[in-house]
Image: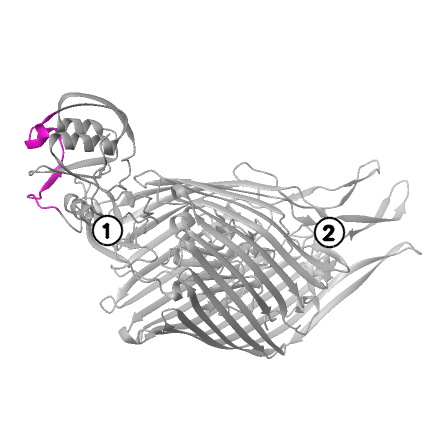
């Protein structure tokens, strides 16, 4: 066999670059290299006749042998994909050009020839149709393909990831003129403008060379348990794309519900609020554009069914499930940071949506010759109207709305200033005896300003100043079947909060970054709570029932401030090793807390595609002035709770675009304050007055587990992920380790989505299975009041068994969503149809002990189960127009 001919990578890159037309280097009509085709077979050396035989010979050796016999000069990159493929072929007096075409007939390689007899092998262009936007991304220095680069048409639904060969395809794009953005960690971001797409003309392949840039120390992710969602940054790849989040099956198109299938995250069917590694939702630090959010949910009386932020207004999300660094504080478990959409700079754009759950509108645009931008998003939920149309038997009337607005302006060297406003409200009425009736109103109003700027080339700062007001109002009463009163509740609360936060980071050297920050926050609240609950006590002596009333009254007006300081030097110990050592101090006046939190994070990248991250630290959470447990008769605050995190994770890039990650964690909890729980299966609008309300006083707690996630999202037609978690979270109560209510021992999650090359529709299927949650068994105490020939009168009282001593059956659910896009003049219409719990699985959320008496006076004890949400179909439509949004 002939020896493989080689040349330097620079020469190959130059020849290939000249040979392949692109948007960056378009070949002129007089270019020296043209594709080898049948019409050129008789030209010069290409017409030389060759006779040879190949048996299981590599393509590289076969072409080299033909070129040598015909006297052709051959150049190629030895790393060119497909060269090692083998061919078996007999050639007898065949022209050299025809012989080469036969060897390359089924290979992903194309021969380019010049009039002087030079031959260059390059990747074969993929077959394209008119309107298809595709291309290749290469390293500008080495000309090697760049995999994992994100390519997006700005302001549209079209985005993808470059594959192992550096190639990408955005599919068939509607007619228009677009801008493209290409980003990849370690490379300078590239913006391409004036990409014109026409349905009757092919677009040349886009060849994008990326220049290397040093990876800024500030962009290195040192925290394990990190998930970047919606839009990837240069710091870390995204876990879920914007398209996946917007099209994944979810009730109410809610950003909180979109992430509840990630490893370590658990939630109920009824609530958008989620728990991270066994911690309650109140232990999660949630922010929007730097503002800390307090109880950011609609439908609070029903468990918080939806968040108060429209997912369409969210531009990016970061979820950290453990080991977060010292700039985040006053929380025990994790961080959920949301960033709003940056307003378009290409003219005004509006989106109008209508679904079973709500109606929504979002509009955005620019001012100041593109230096400024504005955005307004508003939603109105009409579950009350949907229930009326469905002829619901009860009088449940939930109503809610939310409005988010933002205006930002770029002052050049002075930085960017943005003004934000968020207002959300709820009202609910429920009148259906014998359950307690309720009339409630909630409102959350925030206003805040952010200022981001650079001071010189090394110093950066961010300032957030905010004001907020929240109000809660609940009134209710219970009436027995005989018309007598059983309960009264009157609950009034409000809170005012304001604060200023400033974060600084300075690049001391290329290997040393210093972060420091401070926050001052003041809050005041008012509580006016009263409840009275009737308890019918049985007197065994006279065998009668004596009604008594249990009352709770709390009136308080607490106020307090929180002062925070943190410092976190980050040092690059070696090219592949980065460490951050942080310390945080928090002073909270109304709880008299003065706590210090040391933390340590380490990131090691032994080779490209492999990242190991570890973290250790202490975390404190003080009780907010809005968190007094007045409804349970508590009028004081407790000292801060403490958690110690130990986390170790590995993330690995695998062949064929796969990414795998495994993480182990151990969180030890101490200084826990008393908690009040309603341990029955019901969703009660007044949980504090139910018979199943208990107080627990944990001595300590512990959460530990292992999580795995395997995913593939390389911009192909199909993407998927598969997760598994083994976890355990317990509290030590009265000398016994008691599982928490959402102790989810084993969990398996998966999602799969498919779209055609035209990107006109997307089908997404998602599933979850987990072992059953613990529950508290109940029993009934029965006392006979009268037992005669005509009357049987019993006094029945429920009793709780051992707390969380039994487990429910395992939970399983599969959801599906189909989204169809219609590109119209100056916009897009998208329709979706979704089925939650597609197969109608009966997932138990608890059991209720019941006693029944038949006409013959026979008494029977039953324990029927109560289920989570059954099969629930929904649908909706969205119309986007203006700008470049498609």
Compare residues 37 and 720 and report the one nearer the observer.
37
Q: Is residue 761 magenta?
A: no
Seen at 22% across and 28% down, the residue is 103
Seen at 48% across and 72% down, the residue is 468
Residue marked by disc 2: 481
Residue 786 in the image: above or below residue 39: below
Compare residues 501 and 358 and report the one nearer the observer.
501
* Residue 406 placement, left or right of 327: left
Q: Nearer the viewer, mark 1 or mark 2?
A: 1
The x and y percentages for residue 258 are: 47, 51
Q: How many marks?
A: 2
**Residue 41 visible to the viewer:** no
* Residue 541 placement, left or right of 307: right
Residue 434 in the image: above or below residue 114: below
Q: Residues within 10 Å of mark 1 (few under 14, many from 20)?
A: many
The x and y percentages for residue 355 are: 43, 48
Q: Residues within 10 Å of mark 2 (few under 14, many from 20)?
A: few
Compare residues 687 and 384 and report the one nearer the observer.
687
The x and y percentages for residue 646 are: 58, 60
Return the mark for residue 208. 1
Q: Residue at the far right: name it.
A: 541
SS of the residue under disc 1:
strand
* Residue 86 placement, left or right of 835: left
SS of the residue under disc 2:
loop
Q: Quadrant of the N terminus?
A: top left
Compare residues 57 and 567 and report the one nearer the observer.
57
Tell me how far mark 1 sits from mark 2, CA to CA: 75 Å
Magenta part of the chain: 27-49
Residue 178 in the image: above or below residue 875: below
- Marked residue nearer the N-terminal end (1 or 2): 1
Return the mark for residue 156. none
């Amino acid at each position: 066999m002939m020896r493989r001919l080689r040349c330097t990578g620079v020469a190959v890159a130059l020849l290939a670059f000249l040979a392949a037309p692109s948007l960056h280097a378009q070949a002129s009509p007089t270019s020296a290299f043209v594709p080898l085709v049948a019409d050129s077979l008789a030209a010069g050396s290409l017409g030389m006749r060759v006779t040879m035989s190949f048996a299981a010979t590599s393509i590289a050796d076969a072409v080299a042998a033909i070129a040598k016999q015909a006297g052709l000069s051959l150049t190629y990159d030895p790393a060119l994909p497909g060269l090692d493929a083998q061919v078996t072929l007999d050639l007898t007096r065949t022209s050299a050009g025809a012989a080469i075409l036969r060897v390359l007939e089924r290979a992903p390689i194309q021969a380019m020839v010049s009039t002087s007899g030079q031959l260059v092998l390059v990747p074969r262009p993929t077959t394209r149709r008119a309107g298809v936007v595709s291309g290749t991304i290469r390293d500008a220095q080495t000309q090697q393909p760049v995999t994992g680069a994100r390519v997006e048409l700005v302001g549209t639904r079209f985005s993808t990831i470059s594959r192992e060969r550096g190639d990408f395809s955005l599919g068939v794009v509607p007619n228009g003129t677009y801008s493209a953005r290409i980003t990849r960690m370690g490379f300078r971001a590239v913006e391409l403008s004036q990409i014109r797409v026409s349905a009757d003309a092919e677009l040349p392949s886009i060849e994008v060379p990326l220049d290397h840039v040093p990876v800024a120390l500030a962009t290195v992710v040192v925290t394990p348990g990190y998930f970047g969602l919606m839009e990837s940054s240069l710091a870390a790849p995204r876990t879920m794309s914007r398209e996946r989040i917007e099209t994944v099956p979810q009730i109410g198109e809610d950003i909180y519900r979109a992430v509840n299938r990630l490893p370590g995250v658990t939630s109920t069917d009824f609530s958008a609020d989620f728990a991270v590694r066994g911690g309650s939702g109140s232990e999660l630090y949630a922010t929007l554009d730097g503002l800390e959010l307090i109880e950011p949910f609609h439908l609070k009386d029903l468990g918080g069914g939806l968040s108060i932020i429209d997912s369409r207004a969210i531009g990016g999300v970061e979820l950290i499930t453990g080991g977060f660094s010292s700039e985040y504080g006053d929380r025990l478990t994790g961080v959920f940071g949301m960033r709003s959409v940056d307003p378009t700079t290409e003219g005004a754009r509006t989106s109008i949506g209508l679904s079973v759950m709500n109606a929504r509108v979002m509009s955005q645009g620019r001012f100041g010759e593109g230096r400024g931008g504005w955005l307004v998003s508003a939603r109105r939920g009409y579950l009350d109207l949907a229930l009326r149309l469905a002829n619901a038997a009860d009088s449940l009337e939930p109503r809610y709305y939310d409005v988010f607005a933002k205006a930002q302006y770029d002052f050049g060297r002075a930085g960017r200033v943005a003004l934000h406003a968020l207002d959300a409200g709820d009202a609910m009425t429920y009148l259906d005896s014998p359950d307690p009736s309720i009339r409630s109103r909630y409102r959350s109003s925030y206003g805040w300003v952010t200022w981001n700027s650079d001071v010189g080339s090394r110093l950066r700062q961010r300032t957030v100043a905010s004001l907020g007001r929240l109000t809660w109002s609940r009134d209710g009463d219970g009436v027995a079947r005989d018309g007598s009163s059983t309960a009264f509740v009157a609950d009034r609360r409000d809170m005012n909060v304001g604060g200023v936060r400033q974060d600084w980071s300075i690049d001391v050297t290329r290997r040393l970054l210093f972060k420091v920050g401070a926050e001052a926050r003041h809050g005041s609240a008012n509580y006016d709570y009263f409840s009275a609950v009737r308890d019918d006590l049985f007197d065994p002596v006279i065998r009668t029932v004596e009604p008594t009333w249990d009352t709770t009254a709390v009136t308080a007006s607490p106020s307090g401030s929180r002062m925070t300081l943190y410092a976190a030097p980050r040092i690059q110990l070696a090219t592949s090793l980065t460490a951050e050592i942080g310390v945080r101090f928090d002073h909270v006046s109304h709880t008299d807390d003065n706590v210090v939190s040391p933390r340590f994070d380490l990131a090691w990248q032994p080779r490209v595609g492999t990242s190991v991250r570890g973290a250790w630290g202490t975390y404190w959470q003080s009780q907010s002035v809005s968190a007094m447990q007045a409804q349970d008769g508590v009028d004081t605050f407790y000292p801060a709770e403490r958690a110690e995190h130990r986390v170790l994770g590995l993330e690995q890039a695998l062949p064929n675009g796969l990414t795998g990650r495994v993480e182990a964690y151990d969180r030890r909890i101490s200084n826990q304050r008393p908690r009040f729980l309603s341990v029955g299966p019901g969703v009660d609008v007044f949980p504090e007055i139910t018979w199943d309300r208990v107080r627990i006083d944990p001595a300590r707690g512990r959460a530990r587990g292992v999580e795995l996630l395997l995913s593939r999202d390389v911009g192909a037609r199909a993407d998927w992920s598969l997760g598994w978690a083994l976890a355990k979270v317990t509290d030590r109560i009265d000398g016994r380790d008691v599982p928490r209510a959402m102790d989810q021992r084993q969990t398996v999650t998966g999602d799969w989505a498919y779209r055609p090359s035209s990107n006109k529709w997307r089908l997404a299927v998602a599933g979850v299975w987990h072992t059953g949650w613990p529950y508290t068994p109940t029993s009934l105490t029965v006392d006979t009041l009268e037992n005669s020939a005509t009357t049987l009168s019993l006094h029945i009282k429920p009793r709780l068994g051992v707390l969380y001593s039994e487990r429910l059956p395992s939970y399983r659910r599969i959801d599906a969503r189909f989204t169809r896009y219609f590109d119209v003049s100056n916009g897009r219409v998208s329709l979706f149809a979704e089925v939650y719990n597609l197969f109608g699985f009966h997932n138990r959320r608890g059991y209720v002990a019941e006693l029944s008496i038949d006409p013959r006076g026979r008494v029977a004890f039953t324990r029927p189960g109560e289920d989570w949400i059954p099969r629930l179909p929904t649908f909706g439509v969205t119309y986007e127009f203006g700008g470049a949004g498609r």
